[in-house]
Image (spheres, grey):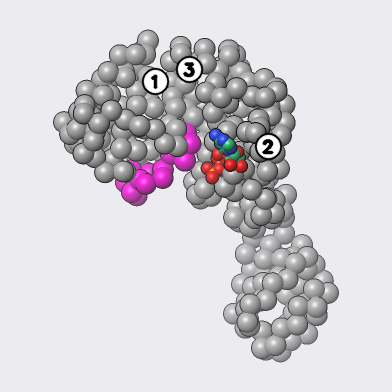
Amino acid sequence: MGNALELRAVTKTYGPVKALGGVDLVVGEGETVAVLGPNGAGKSTLLSIALGLRAPASGTARVLGRAPLEALRAGRVGVLPQESGLLDDVRVGELVAAVAGMYPDPLTPELAMRAAGIEPIAARRVGQLSGGQRQRVRFALCVVGDPDLLVLDEPTVGLDVEGRRALWHEVRARTARGRTAVFATHYLTEADDYADRVVLLAGGEVVADGSVATVKSLVGGSEVRCVLGAADPAELEILPGVRQVSVEGRAVSLRTNDSDATLRALFARYDDVSDVRVESTDLESAFVSLTGGRG
Ligand SMILES: Nc1ncnc2c1ncn2[C@@H]1O[C@H](COP(=O)(O)OP(=O)(O)OP(=O)(O)O)[C@@H](O)[C@H]1O
C-alpha cells in the first residue's frame, strides 16, 4: 500500500508568524492519525496544506501520490473543515444528493445521511438547523463521495453524545476497510480511543509522533498522589525516583520514574500520609509535558 499523505519539510508563515517550521509527516494508507497540539500550534494550517487549500512556503505535500488539489478534485479526499458555510435555503437531503453528484463513485445520499444520523432531518432546510445538526450535515458531505482519505478538523465540536458516537463509528468502519483518516482534536480521549497514531504539534513543529503508548512512554513513569499534613516540596524532591513535585494545600503530586521506591520512602519518611493513589501517565499529562505550554 502507498502513502495517503506525505508532507516533507513543510513550512508556512503568515507575515511575521511562523505557523509551521519544517514538518515531516508521512501517513500510510489505512492509518488513523490524530493531530494534537495547543491552540495556535499549527494543526489547521497543516491540514489545509495537506488538502492543497493553502500552499506551503517551502517543502512538498502529496496526497495519495498526487498533488493535494488533484486528489481533492478527483474526489479521493473527504474534508470536514473547522468552519464552513452551508447553503441555507436547500433541504438537507437535496444538499447531500447534489454533493454526491459531484463525485465519480459516491455513496447513496441515504447511506451518507444514515452514517451521520441525519435521515430524520432530511426534509429540513439547512438554515433552520442547530449547530450540531449542521456539523452532522458537514460530516455527511465529507463521506458521501466515499473518499479514500478523510481529513477532519475538530470533527466533533458541537456534537452531542449520539452524534460523536455515529461519527466515530463511521470513521472506524472506513479505516477498517483500509481507508485513511487524519483528524485534529482537542479531545485527547478521542485520540486515545480512535487513533492508532498521534502526532503532537507545538509551535509549528512535531514534538512527538507515534502510537498513543509510545507518546505516553516519552514522558514515562507515573504519578503518585497523596495527602500530607505538612508538605515541603524541597524534601519531597529528593525522595527516590521523583522527577517533579507539585503541592496544592495538602494535596501532593509526585511524578516519578520508580513509583515503588517513591512510595516506600514516602511511607518511611511521613507518618501522616493518606489517600495514596498511583496513576500511570495519561495522554493529557504527556501532552502538557511535551508541549510545555507552547502554542
Ligand atoms: N490566516 C491567517 N493569518 C495570519 N495568521 C494566521 C492565519 N491562520 C493561522 N494563523 C496563525 O498561525 C498559527 C497556527 O494557526 P493554526 O490555526 O494552524 O493553529 P491550530 O493548531 O489549528 O489552532 P487551534 O487549536 O486554535 O485551532 C497561529 O499562530 C495563528 O494565529
Residue 167 x/y as whole percent: 38, 38
> Dot 2, crowdedness within 10 Å: few (<14), some or many (≥20)?
few
Does the image show residue 246?
yes
Q: Nearer the viewer, mark 3 or mark 2?
A: 2
Is the CB atom of the residue marked by disc 1 within 8 angstroms of ligand 1's nearest atom? no
Q: Is mark 2 within 8 Å of ligand 1?
A: no
For the residues labelled 3 and 2, the Cα–Cα distance comes to: 30 Å
Label drawn at residue 16: 2
Rounded to the nearest angstrom, the CA distance separating label 1 from label 2 is 39 Å
The residue lying at 19 percent from left, 32 percent from top is 125
State which region is magenta.
152-164
Disc ID at residue 172:
none
* For residue 225, above or below residue 175: below
Q: Inspect the image, locate mark 1, and give the three-letter code of the amino acid beneath it.
A: Asp
Q: Nearer the viewer, mark 1 or mark 2?
A: 2
CA distance separating discs 3 and 1: 12 Å
Question: Which of the marked residues, 3 or 1, is nearer the chain's N terminus?
Answer: 3
In the figure, 183 relative to 111: above or below?
below
**Residue 206 in magenta?**
no
Q: Which residue is mark 3?
A: 72
- Residue at screen point 49% across, 29% down: 151
- Residue 165 falls in image quadrant: top left
